Image: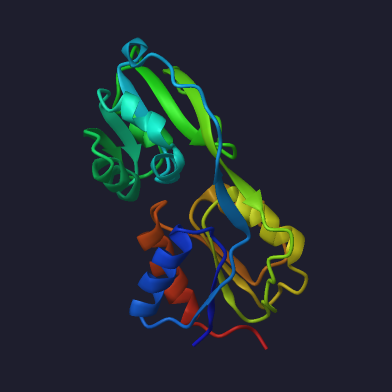
Amino acid sequence: MRQLLLVRPEPGLSASTERARQAGLDVIACPLFRIEPLEWELPNPNDYDGLLLTSANAVRYGGPKLGGLKILPVHAVGAATADAARAAGMTVETVGERDLADLLAKLPKETRLLHLAGDDHRETETGHRVDRRIVYRSAAIERPGLPPIDGLVVAVHSPRAGAQLAELAEQRSRTAIAAISVAAADATGLGWERVEVAERPNDSSLLALAASLCHTSPPK
């Protein structure tokens, strides 16, 4: 069985590592980024109809100002984000199981949304009224200590991680990529043994794909 390399930042890295090991996978953990909180301005919550959350990191790193937004119903992308919001005392009204476009399709266009995001968020044109505050950033680790990846399976949780992996990786013709989204897959570039995309853009689906790839053999 092939080893699985996880490159996402903490605290998600530990959660994914534990989940993968419980599934019987041999895991190497090597984060390429660290999450850091940023200063941000708290707007008037009465100017909005809801709080848009696309990552649990917005809740983890949003800081005490989040308390001023608890009156707003939360519209979250993914179960993990929704769970983090509930744990922080927020009321989750809508959960999008696939991506941001899937979530916003469930909401009226006139809904006024405050989006708490990271600095690597992706712009999505949907016609909705979205105001954004950047509350955290993903800072690249200068020397992440990436191990030799020949023959491994690498799980890529974001386009930014895919791009960073592409910069660091040299030999890649015997390395398989499991990507959380098409955008993450595209960011890894060319020359890999194979690049496959998870059925759904969440950690469970990504690790299921990675597990299937770990049970294949690299080319000789």
Residue 126, horizontal then vertical, whole percent = 45, 23
**Could you tell whether 91 is left or right of 27 in the image?**
left
Model colouring: rainbow
Residue occupying the point 49% across, 88% down: 1
Residue 141 lies, with reference to residue 210, above or below; the image says above
Residue 105 in view, yes or no: no
Q: Nearer the viewer, residue 93 or 68?
A: 68
- Measured from the top left, where is residue 147 in percent x and y? 67, 77
Q: Check the image and name the residue furthest to the front.
A: 64
Instruction: Residue at 59% x, 40% y: name it.
Output: 120
Q: Which quadrant of the structure image shows residue 191?
A: bottom right
Name the one closer to the observer, 119 or 101. 119
Residue 187 position (above or below residue 53): below
Left or right: 140 with respect to 129? right
Q: Residue at x 21, y 33 (%)?
A: 91
Q: Where does the image place residue 194, in percent across and percent down from the top left?
A: 60, 68
Q: Position of residue 162 (x, y in %)?
A: 63, 56
In this orientation, does residue 14 appear? yes
Total residue callouts? 0
For the point 55% across and 30% down, which residue is it?
123
> Quarter of the image containing the C terminus?
bottom right
Res. 28 image quadrant: bottom right
Give the left or right position of residue 145, taking residue 134 as reference. right
